[in-house]
Image (spheres, grey):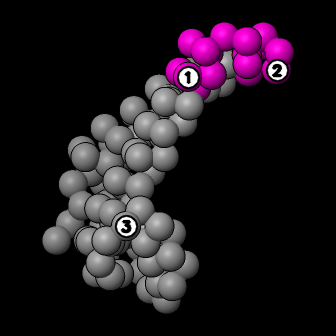
Amino acid sequence: MVVRAEVIRRRLERLDEYLDFLEQMRAYDEREFLADPEHYGSAERFLQLAIEALLDMGSHIIADEGLGSVNQSRDVPRLFRGSTAKKPCHIASHPV
């Protein structure tokens, strides 16, 4: 099974959007940021979306590389840490 480069590309594009939004939130000082639920609520949501995008990409790569089974989100970093495979991922040959 080869991870479809287009799937990863779309997740990376979304991740860039989420990170751009979070970067914009840095313009507010702490008091201003915390005083407005719209600011901190939006930042929390975009952080959650960024994490979900990373976990989703990780799950795709883990499945492709046969590194194990992802049953919970915390399995993704654990499976990458435990991987002894040093071979390049199949998506590396596709421009992302």
Residue 60 lies, with reference to residue 70, above or below; the image says: above
Q: Look at 54% across and 36% down and name the residue there.
A: 47
Question: Image check: 41 left or right of 54?
Answer: right
Quarter of the figure with residue 39: top right
Q: Which residues are magenta?
A: 26-43
Q: Label 2 is placed on what type of residue?
A: Glu
| Residue occupied by mark 1 | 41
* Whole-percent x, y for residue 37 in the image: 61, 15
- Structural crowding at the residue carrying mark 3, measured as other residues with C-alpha within 10 Å and reported as few (<14), some (14–19) or many (≥20): few
Q: Main secondary structure of the magenta part?
A: helix
Residue 70 placement (x, y as % from top left): 32, 72
**Residue that numbered label 2 is attached to:** 30
- Residue 77 is situated, as x and y percent measured from the top left of the image, at 51, 69
Element at label 1: helix
For the point 44% across and 51% down, the residue is: 54
Whichever of callouts 2 and 1 sits on the residue coming sooner in the sequence is: 2
Amino acid type, callout 3: Gln
Quadrant in the picture for residue 35: top right
Tell me which residue sits at (57%, 12%) in the image: 38
Q: For this view, does 71 lie left or right of residue 36?
A: left
Identify the residue position indicated by label 3 in the image: 72
